[in-house]
Image (cartoon, rainbow, N blue to C red):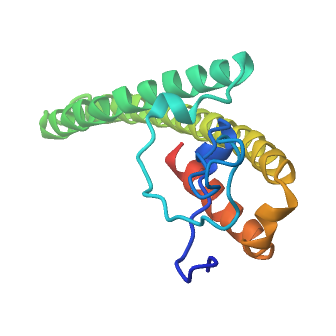
Amino acid sequence: MGANGKAEKFSLSKKLFGKKKKNTNNGGNGPDDVEDPNNVHVEDTKSVSYFTLFGLADKRDKTILAVGVIAALINGALMPLFSLLFGNFADAAAGGIHGFMHRISKVAWEMCVLGAISFVASSVFNTCFTYFSENQVTRLRVKYLQAVVGQDIAWFDVRTPAALPARMSEDVLKVRDAI
């Protein structure tokens, strides 16, 4: 709760990108770019674009993300092939008795190969996406901590210090889930 009894929201993006609220309560006797600790406000949460979420990614992270996207596309492309192979399996089962085991074995082998490729592709894309999101979250936590540590003492007077880690964890988990 803030000084005026309203629940305050700590804007992660505002702290990361260094935008400060203009001080309108100083009576014109001070600098306008300093936050007023007595002016606690409730901010509307805004949607963030996907490109903004990836703003902290370096070249290595983008490469890992690209590998993950390619693996996800491969895995997605394999799903319709399973339907085609199942149709081939039904055709092989409906055929004559002569060569039945050979036809069924061939389709079963193709399904096993497709299943193995799908397993590898899904493992790769899950690993890449998880690794990428954890790297992003780690960088975000560092930026968040730097933003909090860089605040004036008066900033902590109107905010509950115990609520900051909980709020940081909540915000960072939202970002990780979004990625």
* Residue 117 visible in the shown view: no
The answer to whether residue 35 is above or below residue 60 is below
The answer to whether residue 153 is above or below residue 114 is below
Residue at 62% in and 60% down? 10
Q: Position of residue 38 (x, y in %)?
A: 66, 68
Q: In screen coordinates, is 164 left or right of 13?
A: right
Quadrant assignment for the N terminus: bottom right
Residue extending farthest to the bottom is 5
Q: Position of residue 46 (x, y in %)?
A: 42, 49
Q: Position of residue 174 (x, y in %)?
A: 55, 56
33 and 122: which is toward the camera: 33
Q: Position of residue 106 (x, y in %)?
A: 37, 27
Tell me where residue 5 sits by quadrant. Answer: bottom right
103 and 146: which is toward the camera: 146
Quadrant assignment for the C terminus: top right
* Residue 138 visible in the shown view: yes
Q: In screen coordinates, is 17 left or right of 160?
A: left
154 and 95: which is toward the camera: 154
Residue at 48% in and 59% down? 43
3 and 162: which is toward the camera: 3
Q: In screen coordinates, is 106 left or right of 151?
A: left
**For the image shown, how many numbered marks are present on the structure?**
0
Residue at 74% in and 67% down? 164
